[in-house]
Amino acid sequence: MADVWSQRRASRYGRYDGGPDPLAPPVDLSEALDAIGEDVMAGYSPERALREFLRRGGRDQAGLDDLARRVAERRRELASKHDLDGTLQEVRELLDRALLEERKQLARDAMMDDGDRALREMTLDSVSPNPAAAVSELASYDWQSREAREAYEQIKDLLGRELLDQRFQGMKQALENATDEDRAAIAEMLSDLNELLEKRQRGEDTQGDFEEFMAKHGQHFPEGPENLDELLDAMAARAAAAQRMMNSMSPEQRQQLMELSAQAFGSPQLMDALSRLDGNLQQLRPGEDWFGSERMEGSEGIGLGDGTGVFQDLAELDALSDQLSQSYGGARMDDLDLDALARQLGDEAAVDARTLQQLEKALRDNGTLQRGSDGQLRLTPKAMRQLGKALLRDAADRLSGRQGQRESRQAGAAGERSGSTRAWAFGDTEPWDVTRTLTNAIVRTAGEPRTGPAIRLTIDDVEVQETEERTQAAVALLVDTSFSMAMDGRWVPMKRTALALHTLIRSRFRGDHLQLIAFGRHAQPMEIEELTALDAMYDKGTNLHHGLLLANRHFRKHPNAQPVLLVVTDGEPTSHLEPDGEVFFTYPPHPLTVAYAVRELDNARRLGAQTTFFRLGEDPGLARFIDQMASRVDGRVVAPELDDLGAAVVGSYLGDRAGFGRSGLGGGGYGGWFGNRGFWVGD
């Protein structure tokens, strides 16, 4: 027991670094679902709609486009900031210092023979203006100045460290003030590394060979590779960046650096080992970009090692740009390299990307999106219900905001309360209204002396709550899917309206029978999933006649239900069905087309349909036609704004239900009990 306690006391808490923050709030899917649903109803596939939302982001969430913009800005900043002449500039500065210090020493040395001084001065004066040639020409010069000799030796040391830093990040700093033993250790490491890589090319290497190499030279590889492939990947990426840097230099710069390389550490063997290493890496990783180049337009000189790092950054930014575009086959948000994003743009960008990854995963995993047998993403029924509820809430807000509301906890369903009470009669099974019953008893006994219980009930005191019979409705919602609906921006509001009404009926009035009918050049019944996914139709024609035929067929299939006809359109009828089933189309509307539509509307009236037309647009001809049609069947005309279309249709349906389902209330307007919100929306 004591051991357990001591172990507990020894526990320590530290910063969590095992993945996403476990205390972070869950991602909010409602905004994503609304946006995806909107795009789906506009004709996008769910797959594309998901990609579009991830691309745009949300109100408080950066999207892929914003991250890609920042990646592009970072890339432009790197390319416009630096110049590749940094190492050559340092060589020139050290060379100028060496020559200056040597001339100073020659001038001070009074003991030197005049002929020797003149010869030395002539040698210095004749040094080539080309730094590489000058360094080579002075290789055998006997420096008289200690400061000059040190500056010249620094050139060779700098070149060696820069060349190594190109292949092994951090070598420039690690080898500063290096001893001969340090340089010998580097030479041995390069030799062993080349032998290991050449073993790999022959297929003779083992994991033991790698572990033996790392045990001996692991201090030069801070990345901590666990096998030769990881080591190869890291080294080849940097070596390829170094090669791209060289490719990006001017021919003169490349020539000077090649000549200077022979002077690195004063040992041509270093350049031979590095050339051998580059060849091995290129053989083993030919897929790296060894031949690319980059235009660098800045003024800030950068050395070979740091420049290679910049070129690695540029390559990493290019890879991030591809990942963020998600434009390749099979792209997934999991492809994003969050570590690279944090390196290039900071931790906040990585958090934004991780949130998008979680959002995509949540949409796929929580039943919002699912992949069908054809491999395509689809909105699930659960997602459709969530969208419908959101649209229904929007319709409720618009109705209540426009016409007033009062709270109620009851909806008009069969056997439910109407809000009125009446005296109990023999045979009543309705619930008592306790408040009214007790009030009646108190009022009746108010003047009597209290000799017994405080309240005495009699049968005459009892009042019961009135309930109503609920009449079923057969609802036909006809939505115009003609060319003009798509062209004039009415396509998505039409779909939103249908989904809101469908959700209301399926959730609150399950006994009602809803038929969705799309009518363009011809008409057809549709399930809500079909209608919401329907692409914009560009066939001309508004076949109201065919739509009304299907609506009347729906009414006849439900003879005991009250017919409700709701028609959403933005144009006069321009096509009808001929007796042989062919579609007749002409514009302007043919009198026969109008006659056929009127005949079916009359049939709907004879079936008892309560009719409402929702007129979209300001066309005077359409307004006259709709007014005449509505007047003919004692119907109503509503001309809502597009944003109010859903509220208008839902409100009309509720008003019609109030008219035939609630005693003493006439139809019309937008009155009705409003679904899950418990709002009574009155005229």
Image (cartoon, rainbow, N blue to C red):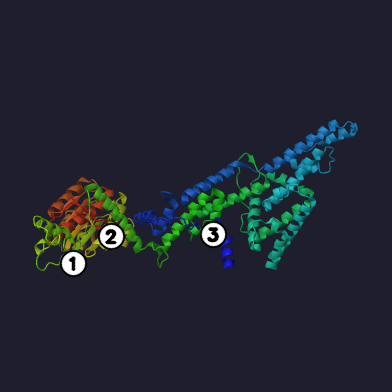
Q: Which of 290 and 644 is in front in this view?
A: 644
Q: Nearer the viewer, residue 34 or 29?
A: 29
Q: Which of marks 2 and 1 is nearer the N terminus?
A: 2
| Callout 2: SS | helix
Q: Is residue 463 left or right of residue 365?
A: left
Residue type of the residue flagged with mark 1 = His
Instruction: Name the spot of residue 442 as percent of width and height, x first.
Output: 12, 57
Disc nearest the viewer among 1 and 3 = 3
User: Residue at horizontal 16%, vertical 50%?
Assistant: 627
Q: Earlier in the sequence, mark 1 or mark 3?
A: 3
Numbered mark located on residue 18 in the image? 3
Quadrant location of the N terminus in the rendered image? bottom right
Disc nearest the viewer among 2 and 3 = 3
Disc nearest the viewer among 2 and 1 = 2
592 w.r.t. 207: above or below: above
Instruction: Name the spot of residue 195 as percent of width and height, x first.
Output: 73, 62
172 w.r.t. 452: above or below: above
Residue at mark 1 = 558
Q: Are marks 1 and 3 in contact (CB under 8 Å)?
A: no
User: Residue at horizontal 31%, vertical 57%?
Assistant: 389
Cα–Cα span, label 1 and label 3: 61 Å
Q: In this view, does 233 lie to the left or right of 407?
A: right
Q: Which of 464 and 478 is in front in this view?
A: 464
Cα–Cα span, label 2 and label 1: 20 Å
Is residue 579 visible in the rendered structure shown here? no
Residue type of the residue flagged with mark 2 = Thr
Q: Quadrant of residue 574?
A: bottom left
Residue at mark 2 = 503
